[in-house]
Image (cartoon, rainbow, N blue to C red):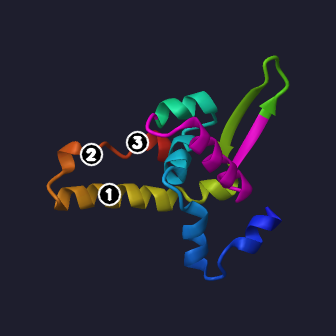
Amino acid sequence: MAEAIKQLPTLPAERALKVLSGRWKAIILYHLFAGPRRLSQLKRKLPDTSQKVLIQQLRELEEHGLVAREIFPEMPPRVEYSVTALGRSLKPLLRALCEWGQRHAAEANELERMGECEESAFG
């Protein structure tokens, strides 16, 4: 993580945006808030992303200390991803973004196309 920290901006807001930048990072965290997931489970939740991109985003989240990867000593090996305490601290921010997205859709008269902010992710 030390190498990644050297590359991050010094302005706090810019740093936060840099760590969370990427099309899928916030959505990955959103799904991991409900509990640990295997790569295949995350892939099913994000069908519009390739496995390569999903793995890359997970690695970056892990590098920044937001996600932990656990390898279970089984045959074949099982790998699970979970949110760290630092990652869980983003729950209020992602909940606010979810609610803001619904509000924005309502203002644009597109609320019927929107999904709900799942309480299982934020509970």
**Can the viewer see residue 23 in this picture?**
yes
Q: Which residue is tagged 2? A: 114
**48 within the magenta span:** yes
Choose mark 3 or mark 1, whichever is in front: 1
Crowding at dot 1, Cα within 10 Å, few <14 / some 14-19 / many 20+, comes out as some
Element type where label 3 sits in the image: loop
Spatial separation of the CA atoms under disc 3 and disc 2: 12 Å
Marks 3 and 1, how far apart in space?
A: 13 Å
Per the image, the residue denoted by label 3 is 118
Mark 2 Cα shell of 10 Å, populated few (<14), some (14-19), many (≥20): few
> Is 67 situated above or below 46?
below
Residue 21 figure quarter: bottom right
Horizontal relation, residue 9 to residue 76: left or right: left
Q: What type is the residue that disc 2 sits on?
A: Met
Query: How far across and how far down the image is residue 67, in percent?
Result: 68, 49
Tell me whether the residue at label 2 lies in contact with that at label 1, contact meaning CB atoms closer than 8 angstroms. yes
